[in-house]
Amino acid sequence: MSDIILTVITILGAVLTLGGLAYGARKLSREYRELGQKLTDAGAISGDQSVPKEERDARRHAILPPTSSWGDIEYFREWVRYFILQQAVTGLGWPAALTASGVVLSTVASAWSVWV
């Protein structure tokens, strides 16, 4: 009975680890896409000279409220965040694949060692 419990716990640990890895990767990719789209939309509104400045500011801030404080460049922090996310998303592939492979192989080895 303890062999079965140990095997189930080992497999559950792997499933939770892989689930966390997949969830984090999806969340990172989604935030990157959404922030990029909002910055693009805000930039398009800024370039529309047919709309009064106050209305352009209101529309831009409705899409993406700036988090920069007085004296900062508007959307400076958002652009920095976007570029950090871009680097993380583009570099995620192989490290995530190797991590997932390592978790699967170590789980198989651990579960197998219980029965051998």
Image: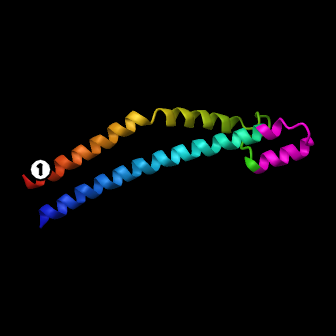
Question: In the displayed structure, does residue 7 sit left or right of residue 86?
Answer: left
Residue 90 x, y percent position in the rendering: 50, 33
Residue 84 x, y percent position in the rendering: 57, 34
Is 13 within the magenta?
no
| Helix, strand or loop for disc 1 | helix
Q: How many marks?
A: 1
33 vs 14, nearest the viewer: 33
Q: Amino acid at mark 1?
A: Ser
| Residue sitting at x 23%, y 44% | 105
83, above or below 27, in the image: above
The overriding secondary structure of the stretch rendered in magenta is: helix
| Residue sitting at x 81%, y 41% | 45
| Residue sitting at x 17%, y 46% | 109
46 vs 61, nearest the viewer: 46
Question: In the displayed structure, does residue 87 sit left or right of residue 54?
Answer: left
Q: Which range is magenta? A: 44-62
Question: In the displayed structure, does residue 100 sit left or right of residue 82?
Answer: left
Q: Quadrant of the N terminus?
A: bottom left
Question: Badge 1, how many Cα within 10 Å: few under 14, some, many 20+?
Answer: few
Residue holding disc 1 = 113
Residue 8: quarter of image: bottom left
Residue 38: quarter of image: top right
Residue 55 x, y percent position in the rendering: 89, 47
| Residue sitting at x 62%, y 46% | 34
83, above or below 21, in the image: above
